[in-house]
Image: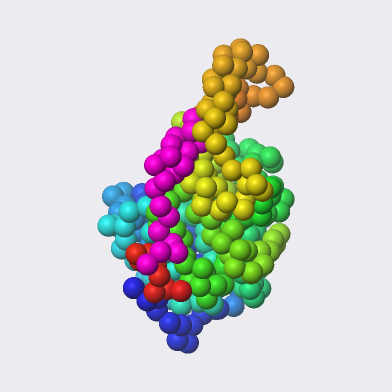
Amino acid sequence: MVPQEPSAAPEVSVIIIVRNGAATIAGQLDALGGQQGAPEFEVIVVDNGSSDGTGKIVETWITGGHPAASSARLIDAGQAKGIPAVRNIGARAARGRVLAWCDSDDAVRPGWVAAMARLQAGLAGGRTLAWRPDGSADHGAFPDGLTATEYLPHAGNCNMAVVRDHFFEVGAYDESLPLYGCEDVDISWRIQEAGYPVHYFPEAVVDFRITARSRVIVKTFRSAKARMAVVLRHPASQLGRPPTLAAVLRDAGQQTLWLPYRLARPRPAPRSRWLRGWVASWGRLTGFAVYGIRRVPAKYGSEEDPLAPLR
């Protein structure tokens, strides 16, 4: 499907994807309603099959008479499979020059849209402040800047903007990536590999809700698995040191061997750090088996790519 071409378009399209976000999405919508100094912008909420009344909450906000809701839309994406696919549905529907991404369980600060509207080329990330479920701050959860890697920096989907034309030029989000697929890392790298810049806008601030600990372990495994997929699809990211089966097996084995000792004597690091490291090592091993040994292919860049017409 070719994306809708802008016509009398707003400057920014804010896109929120959600599934069962009834407990939090009203807060994010109200935060968008409180933007200051922003150019004209639209809000697009893409509902990926919510069953908790999320859609009703969004519709009530849209019809509630708030000025920011005058160009808001709720899109049904209940049949879409995978977060990248849901994000692409929102991007296709967007009319703005800039696509700005935030999450349904966070809250943007009043200057967020105005900051993201400054983007003229490539992609940008903002400042993300993390808050634990008990309301306390986690100052080490996010860097004060883009996330650095040995290869290229990247922004996170919870606080990101990209020039619409450049987003579709590089093929949009890769829909073949798995759940928690590091699609933000992948799109950030592809934008830079195409010659476009990435920026950091510290005035684009988002208050981020940290996931309950019971869900962190599953996300850690899936993110590590997906990160291996991204690494294998960007050979240049390894600086001549591509991952090998021996290396990922050795890492998982060492993490497993040391885990009981580290959990028994956690200082100076908390037990949760060692547990996440162990889970991540097995996620990387699983990812290598799927994407390195089985060689599950990426969709973008092939004739069968369903996003190819978007380029």
Q: Is residue 288 magenta?
A: yes
Residue at 70 percent of width and 19 percent of height: 267
Residue 5 image offset from top left, x and y in percent: 43, 82
Q: Nearer the viewer, residue 300 or 32?
A: 300
Q: Residue furthest bottom?
A: 8
Where is residue 281 drawn, in percent x and y?
A: 53, 31
**Rendered location of residue 203, percent (x, y):** 70, 62
- Residue occupying image coordinates x 44% and y 68%: 91
97 vs 196, left or right, is left
Identify the magenta region.
Answer: 280-303
State yes or no: residue 29 in magenta.
no
301 w.r.t. 27: above or below? below
Residue at horizontal 71 percent and vertical 53 percent from the top:
145
Q: Position of residue 272 (x, y in %)?
A: 58, 26
Residue 273 visible in image: yes
Asked whether residue 275 is in view, the answer is no
Give the residue at x 31% y 63%: 76
